[in-house]
Image (cartoon, rainbow, N blue to C red):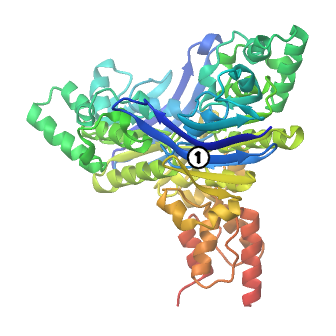
Amino acid sequence: MSIRLENVSFRYLEDTPMETEALLDVTLEIADGEFVGIIGPTGSGKSTLIQHFNGLLLPSSGKVWVDGVDLTHKDTQLRQIRQKVGMVFQYPEHQLFGETVLEDVGFGPRNMGLAEEEVVERVRRALAYVGLDFAELKDQSPFELSGGQKRRVAIAGVLAMEPSVLILDEPTAGLDPKGREEILDEICTLHRERGITVILVTHSMEDVARLVDRLIVMDRGRVALDGTPVEVFRQAETLKELGLGLPQVTELMHELKAKGMAVDTDVLTVEAAEEEIVKALGGQR
Amino acid sequence: MKQPLVRFTNVSFTYARAQGRGGWQALRDVNLEVFEHEFVAVLGRNGSGKSTLAKHVNALLTPTSGQVLVAGLDTSVPENVWEIRQKVGMVFQNPDNQLVATTVEEDVAFGPENLGIPPAEIQRRVTEALEAVGMLQYRLHPPHRLSGGQKQRVAIAGIVSMRPKCIVLDEPTAMLDPAGRREVMETIHRLNKEEGITVLHITHHMDEVIGADRVLVMDQGRIVLEGTPREVFSQGELLRELHLDVPQITDLAQRLASRGVSIPSGILTVNEMVMHLCPSD
């Protein structure tokens, strides 16, 4: 399912003295099955942008199509779009409310009017995707779980709608490194096995470098850079101006090259850096 | 022997019937000394007891058994709490939950006002505190219009204006972008170096630990590892078992060493790595 934005601008508090332009003439298309990262400094328009992907915000001017449907058209049923484009907000565990995990995760599918057996089956599948055991947790209160488990239950609540597009805003904020890695691995598995489109908003250059196929960099309401992680991280100067960095290993390769070492700077992972440095040192000796 | 600013002696803490369930033992027999002017970082997986430890330093929690002394004052004695909280300030994760006033300077003045300090002195302290965190030019701004990093610096200024001996920061950068994180980290390092304020910094970001004098690693309510950043990060295997990690550069150095590249294993920064791989003549 593709998402297309054409000349989208968005102004908060339009026609008031407080009017602020949050998006300026954004045109982009996200194709079916892509894994896209969105980065940018605070206030660059990332959150405003993703809220256009499922009609939570509608553009002040311009058009948005999801799966060929024009969201700005007055007859469009946004409710159906939101079932297809699932959104996991920051700290989604703050939105847990059910008395049991089953009730909480099953809320979406139940609201879609599915039969109870289908709801239960979907909850079972959604929990499995985030590495949680249905039998063990279904009757527990979500509020009694650990922080990492709560986060997973909240994500499962979105997955239970079986969306074709999954948007996650900083899904790993506040988690320990192991918890971060597990959740990101689970998202990768979903993308790989179910072929869903994933859009990940994050502050971690290391995570996007490792995971995504395509990286969109936002700056003051515009798309500043758009390309593969390798292409984007070649623009070290631009990223620095935006207050964003490079992944640590990429920065290292740039520094080594500046010192005259024959290394390729298109390196995004520790493994690749290891090979590159061993190779360069081997050549010297 | 110098007196520690903070001393934990055999501290255990159990949350009473945590959220409907039986008691949860969050700290188990913790012994700890933090000295004046130290910068101590605390690592540990979610649920390891880091925040519980932090809340004991300014008497938000008091031990179920054992004793916490802050500048010689027992946190379990209710009469001491007021004085302890003037000596130890806390900064939390969410910048939006900590700011109370309609302008930055009013927010920073809130603490000293509550201490009953004369207005002229408050003015002086607010100016100094905002200067110390690099936010003086925003003194008349409404806090909610600031970036996350700026909000955290205002929250820190609110504590600095109380002239504390120690600041405890509980994941102050978890919700910030890279620029905001950098601002906050630079600010707390500067306060530590220039103002001599003792810092206890809790974080999940391994790279924020690099500049600390000492690192504590917690697991299941205990301190399981303690040392300089270099010492702690040389324990990559153990850290991973504890759901933690090492900085990318440290990981890379260890991998290179195992491939026969002559490089020390405790490398922490890009600069160190460059210096070792390309020694300038």
Q: Position of residue B74 (x, y in %)?
A: 35, 27
Q: Position of residue A60 (x, y in %)?
A: 53, 34
Can residue B266 be seen here? The reply is no
Please indicate whether residue B182 sits to the left or right of residue B101 in the image: right
Q: Residue at x 41, y 24 (%)?
A: B60
Q: Residue at x 64, y 66 (%)?
A: A250
Q: Amino acid at mark 1?
A: Val
Please indicate whether residue A182 sits to the left or right of residue B207 in the image: right
Where residue B70 sits, quadrant-wise, is top left
Q: Chain of mark 1?
A: A
Q: Secondary structure at mark 1?
A: strand
Can residue A87 be seen here? The reply is yes
Q: Which residue is mark 1?
A: A26
| Figure check: A195 above or below A113 | below
| Figure check: A57 above or below B246 | above
Q: Position of residue A213 (x, y in %)?
A: 75, 53
Q: Nearer the viewer, residue A6 or B163?
A: A6
| Figure check: B201 above or below B259 | above
> Neighbour class for label 1 at 10 Å: few (<14), some, many (≥20)?
some
The quadrant the N terminus of chain A occupies is top right
The quadrant the C terminus of chain A occupies is bottom right
Q: Nearer the viewer, residue B46 or A64?
A: A64
Q: Nearer the viewer, residue A246 or A26?
A: A26
Where residue A64 sits, quadrant-wise, is top right
Please indicate whether residue B206 sits to the left or right of residue B122 in the image: right
